[in-house]
Amino acid sequence: MTTGAAKRSRWFYGWTVVATLCMVNFATAATGTLNLGLFIIPMSEGLGISRGVFGWLSTSRSLAAGGSSLVIGSLVDRFGVRLLLPVSSLVTGLCLIGIGASSQMYQVFFLFSFMGLVGLGSQAGSLLSSVPVAKWFVAKRGKALSIAMLGGGIGAIVFVPVTQVLISRLEWRMAWMVLAFTSMAIIIPLSLAFIRRQPEDMGLRPDGEAPVVRAEHSPHVAIADVEEAWTVREALRTRAFWQLTASLMLGGFAMGTAIHRIPYWTERGFDAQTVSLAFSADAAGAAFMIMASGFVLDRVPPRFTAASAFAGFAGAVTIMLVATSTLHMFASTVLFGFSAGINQVSQTYLWARYYGRASLGTIRGITMPMTLLATAAGAPVAGYIYDFTGGYELAWQIAVAVYILAFLFMLSATPPVRPLQSQPRPAPSG
C-alpha cells in the first residue's frame, strides 16, 4: 500500500466512527429527549396525572441511568460500543413502543426506567456516543466531538416539529411507536457496520497518525504511549475531579427543570406549532454551537468554554421570566440552544483533556450517577412547584441561581497536576 493510500486508510477508520456516531445522535433525538416536553400535556391528560408526577418520568429514566452508568462506562472501555449501541437501541425502541401501548402510569414508569438502564436517550447515553470519539482523537478531539454531536442538534431540529405533527395527526400513542421504529432503523445497522473500539486495536494511533510497530509480547499499542493516562484512583484524588462533578451536578439539576419549558410557553398563550418551531430554533442553535465550540475547545482552556454554557443557560431562563412576546420566546430558546451545544461538547472534552483516554469511560461512569441524580431531581421539583403555586416562575428563579453556582465551580476547576511521586521516571542514561 502506498504512503498516500495508507494515510487515507488511517483517516477513514476514525472519521467513519465519527460519522456513524453523528447518525446515532441524530436518531437518539427521536427517543424522548428534547421532544419529550411535547408529550407532557397530551400524556398528562390521557393518563390523568399531574405535572409533578410527570416530572418523575424523566427522573426515573435518569436515576436508572445513574445506577447503570458505572457498568456501562467500564464496558465501553473494555469492549467498545459496536454491540452495546444496537442492544441499547433495540431495548429503547421496544420500551417506546410499550409506552405507546400503556394504559397505566406504573407501566410508563417501568418502561422509562428500563430505558435509562441501557443508557441511550439519557445523559448516560453520551458514554455510548461520545467516549469512542474521544478515544479515536486527541489533537483533533474538539473537531471530532463537535461533528459527532452535531447529529443530536440536527435530530432535534427535525424531530421536534415532526413529533408535534405526529401527536396532532396520530395522537401521542402512535407518535411514540413511529419514533421508536425510526430510531432503531438508523442506529442498529450503522453501529454494527462501522463502529470500532479504538485505534490501538488496529495498530493505529489517534487522529489518523502513522501506526507504530507492535511489540511481540503486546498485541495492542499502549494508550499511554499517545497521551498521559490517569488511573481511576488517581483521578478521584484530584481537586479538579470534584470541582467538575459539583459544577455538572448543579448544572444538571437546573437542566432537569428544562423539560417543563414547552408547557410553560404553551400555557402562556403561544400556539403549540409556534412553540415547536421555537424549540426547533433551540436545536438549530445547539447544532451551530456544537460545531463552533468543538473548534474553540482545541484552542482555549476548556473550563472557560464550559463555564460560558452555564452563563448562557442563566440568561435564557431569565428571559423566560420577563418574556411578553414571540420574539422573547425565540430569543430564550435560541440562547438556551447555544448553551446546550457548548455544554454537550465541553463535558466529554473536559474529562478527556484532564484525565486521558485509557479510563475515560470508567471515570465518566463514576461521575454520571451523581450528575444524573441531581438532574433527576430537577424535573419533579419544577413540576411540584407548578402544582403548588400554579406556575413555573419560582422554579425558573431557582434554576438561574443554580446555573450561576455551576458557572463559578466550573471556572475554578483548573487542570489536575500529578504529584511528583506519580510522575514516570526517566529512562536511565548510558
Image: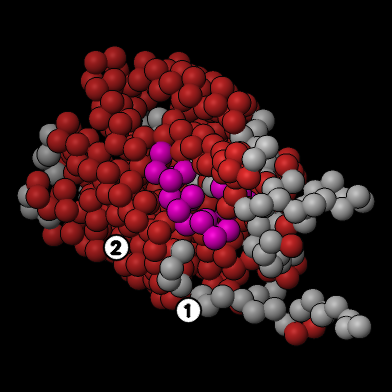
Q: Name the residue rendered at 69%, 67% in the picture.
A: 228
Residue 239 in picture, x, y percent from top left: 61, 77
Is any part of residue 352 visible from this angle?
yes
Identify the coloring: secondary structure
Q: Name the residue rendered at 42%, 18% in the picture.
A: 177
* Residue in the foreground of this view, choosing between 321 and 137: 137
- The amino acid type, in three-letter code, at marker 1 is Ser
N-term-proximal mark, 1 vs 2: 2
- The amino acid type, in three-letter code, at marker 2 is Gly
Most prominent secondary structure in the magenta stretch? helix
Q: Is residue 162 left or right of residue 405?
A: left
Query: In which quadrant will I find the C terminus?
Result: bottom right
Residue 367 in picture, x, y percent from top left: 60, 58
The span shown in magenta is: 131-151
Extreme residue in the front direction:
2
Tell me if mark 2 has few (under 14), some (14-19) or many (20+) residues whose alpha carbon lies within 10 angstroms of its own.
many
Query: In which quadrant will I find the N terminus?
Result: top right
Q: 222 above or below 67?
A: below
Give residue 158's mark. none
Q: Is residue 184 left or right of residue 274?
A: right
* Residue in the foreground of this view, choosing between 317 and 425: 425
Is any part of residue 66 visible from this angle?
no
Looking at the rendered structure, the secondary structure element under dot 1 is helix
Q: 163 above or below 327?
A: above
**Quadrant housing residue 415:** bottom right
Say which residue label 2 marks.
Answer: 312
Give residue 412's mark. 1
